[in-house]
Image (cartoon, rainbow, N blue to C red):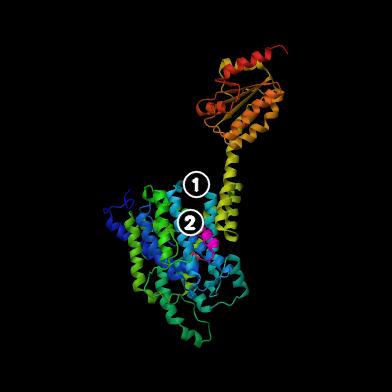
Amino acid sequence: MALIHGFHLRNIRGDILGGITAAVVALPLALAFGNAALGPGGAIYGLYGAVVVGFIAALFGGTPSQVSGPTGPMSVTVAGVVASLAAVGVSRDLSAGEILPLVMAAVVIGGLFQVLFGVLRLGKYITLVPYSVVSGFMSGIGVIILALQLGPLLGISTRGGVLESLNTVASNFQPNWAAVAVAIMTLAIVFLTPRKISQWLPSPLLALLIVTPISVVLFNDATLQARGLDVLPRIGTIPEGGLSFTMPNWNEHLPVIINAGLVLAVLGAIDSLLTSLVADNISQTRHDSNRELIGQGLGNTLAGFLTGLPGAGATMRTVINIKSGGSTPISGMVHSVVLLLVLIGAGPLAAEIPTALLAGILIKVGLDIIDWGFLLRAHRLSLKTASVMYGVLLMTVFWDLIWAVLVGVFIANMLTIDSITQTQLEGMEADNPIDNINAGADLPLTEDEQSLLNQCEQDVMLFRLRGPLSFGAAKGITERMMLVRNYKVLILDITDVPRLGVTATLAIEDMVQEAKINSREAFVVGATGRVKERLAKFGVEGLIDNRKEALEAAINIINQPS
């Protein structure tokens, strides 16, 4: 297996341009996600994560054109990890150095879980999530980002989850007007920048370049204090030396850390592989999902040792990379190298970035993450689908991200099974000769079979089952067992059944036995291949190759003297 999936130098110019463009987009987002995840002082760790995860995931991943780094779901999850650790008595103060090693331990464990997912070849299963669940989850992430950034947008310090953060804003509603002014300028730029300009200079970066200098001139600490106003919250001092190895702390609160690592792993896997599908669609390529999980896992593991925020495949950065010419892992690696150069050369300047500016950028990100198109139209397609989507959204916001996905997938699959079951049983309903309905009216009978059926009059109960029969169909079969008592002969036609589940097999066996108990005869017709082999292994009696033989046997039974 080659070291780098999809590596070649034929597109080096496009890869360099794509990587540089992706880095331009990633810079303000990485800082914003770091601030959102870890609070004041945490922005730089988002940039660390973008550098490390972006490079390693490109080097070892399975999606050539994908650009990885901190994302909305991952930053929201890290914020949840911080809140969980605070709930067990750990200080939230990053400067104290108490919480960061614990968070990084969760990041390392999450990366190792992702590597394990890839080694176990679970990639193809992770993407088998119904769209209603994905939509509800992503929209929930968007709502969480909006709720958590409301405080920083107003210059109000907040902590914790959605409810705690909103409660803090409501109970301590004292806006920092300098922060509000910065936020308004930022929102105006990210929402109103003409498309012709944003195609060349992304609006988040434009806001960073325009609003930061303005805030330094108009809202410096001396000016605000002279006017009796609160100082403007900023990112603050950037640690000197850039990336450095730090040993995470696995010695305390291990259950919380392992649980957090698993959550990060699952969300990162879903986030990355969904972005891989987007990349495949745009670039007309095909990714290796298991290799992608291994690459993402290695990137996050190393990020944890280098105090970087965990990352995943970033959809917007990946799309921009591809449209700018990037097509191989070189583009993702160039993106990381550019960010590293910015980190080394522009650290003192980054310290002056207002947190309200980052909050404004994230407000735009949150609104973009929400699946407005599906959110507003789901009820037109199906009330069940809409219920699943809205339910996952609410559980994501107010309960737990992983449980929201698990519960949503379970309910969505149950609804799907119910729908398939109803389809499987439609033929059974139609072919049931109750109240003098012709048993064979909906069956593709030959002339000979129709003639034999007519001779049976109302003494034969003829069922036809179609399609693969899962455990859902077993209930419908079982519910009809009592009808056997009304007829002398049961003919169960499974000619059009290519697959038979264990539960459905047992239901057929029970129906045959029910007929025998009530002194009736039962024939199972048309079984072939594995279906016939399974019925034989279960010892099901009355197996006949075709309907004509079964109808002839039925006539002989009917004509026998009582």
Whole-percent x, y for residue 324 in the image: 34, 58
Query: Quick one: 514 or 8, which is closer to the camera?
Result: 514
Q: Quadrant of the C terminus?
A: top right
Indicate the amino acid at tag 2: Ala
Residue annotated with mark 1: 128
Q: Amino acid at mark 1?
A: Leu
479 and 104: which is toward the camera: 104
Picture quadrant of residue 239? bottom left
Q: Residue furthest left?
A: 10
Residue drawn at point x = 43 percent, y = 70 percent: 44
The residue pinned by badge 2 equals: 265
Picture coordinates of residue 103, whole percent (x, y): 49, 66
Q: Report the magenta residues as a range.
A: 250-264
Up the image or down, 416 lies above or below 262; here it is: above
Compute the Cα span from label 2 to label 1.
16 Å
Q: Secondary structure at mark 1?
A: loop
Does residue 124 appear left or right of residue 443 in this picture?
Answer: left
Q: Main secondary structure of the magenta part?
A: helix
Look at discs 2 and 1 and give the one toward the viewer: 2
If you read the primary sequence from the N terminus, does the residue marked by circle 2 or circle 1 appear first?
Answer: 1
Residue found 59% across the figure and 67% down from its top: 87
Please report the residue visible at 49 percent of the width from the left and 56 percent of the height from the top. Answer: 267
